[in-house]
Amino acid sequence: KDNVFAHNMLGMAYFEKGKTDKAIDHLNQAIHISPNFFLSYQYLGNIYRDTGRHDLAIRHYNESIRLMPDKVESYYGRGSSYIEMKQYQPAINDLNTSIRLKPDYADAFNNRAFIFLMLDQYQKALEDYNRAILAKPYHAKALNNRAFIYLSTGNTGPGCLDAEKACKLGICSTLQLAKEKGLCR
């Protein structure tokens, strides 16, 4: 009943089963038992982020970061919420911290590249997609997005190649669009 680890595990198990309210209840019980255990806040941040409640996610990630300032996952999660809220500069700051703490963090490079893409900074986006793919060669989102940049800038050879690789990994949106426009076969 007073086991913080059990409540954390139950919280995550309930969330994976789609029982968000029970998950939140158990994680709040974990925080009640041990208010300085960062992981409960991080898990709540993840749940709120994944369910689109980004203000609550950020609040919980803030607490997780206050308690454990070197946990890369909390910066990444908070940055992801900032992206969803279109608050790009705080998102970039958090993703920069994620990358500083974990220099081969492919998902952080991918998300930061997405921001640069949204800001029409194609060269920066391309550089970060390259870093994401270097760290994780089968990163379907990064391959798909890099293909989009290549194809948008007239570089059809590598664009079609990346789009085909991304499609084989399950993301076919750029390849389909390129085929419709006659850019790829």
Image: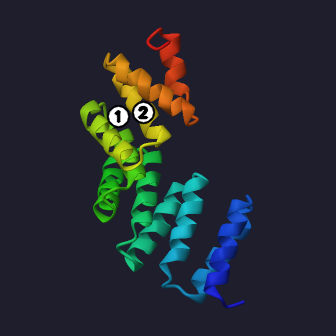
| Mark 1 element type | helix
Residue 152 percent across, percent down from the top left = 36, 20
In three-dimensional space, the C-alpha distance between marks 1 and 2, rounded to whole angstroms, equals: 9 Å
Please give the residue where the numbered disc 2 appears in the rendered image. Answer: 145
| Coloring applied to the structure | rainbow
Give the farthest residue toward the bottom.
Answer: 2
Identify which amino acid the numbered label 1 is placed on: Leu
Q: Is residue 120 positioned above or below 39 on the image?
A: above
Q: Is residue 161 positioned above or below 85 on the image?
A: above
For residue 110, side relative to residue 169 (left or right): left
Contact flag, marks 1 and 2 (Cβ < 8 Å): yes
Please give the residue where the numbered disc 1 appears in the rendered image. Answer: 117
Q: Residues within 10 Å of mark 2 (few under 14, many from 20)?
A: many
Q: Nearer the viewer, mark 1 or mark 2?
A: 2
For residue 124, side relative to residue 13 (left or right): left
Task: Say which of 134 and 114 sits in front.
Answer: 134
Asked whether residue 55 appears in the rendered view, the answer is yes
Of the numbered discs in the image, which one, if any, rests on residue 63?
A: none
For residue 147, side relative to residue 20 (left or right): left
Residue 56 percent across, percent down from the top left = 53, 62
Q: Quadrant of residue 16?
A: bottom right
Q: Residue at x 49, y 39 (%)?
A: 140
Task: Say which of 95 and 104 sits in front.
Answer: 104
Residue 173 percent across, percent down from the top left = 54, 26
Residue 40 percent across, percent down from the top left = 55, 75
Q: Is residue 33 positioned above or below 138 on the image?
A: below
Identify which amino acid the numbered label 2 is placed on: Asn
Q: Residue at x 36, y 27 (%)?
A: 149
Q: Residue at x 67, y 71 (%)?
A: 11
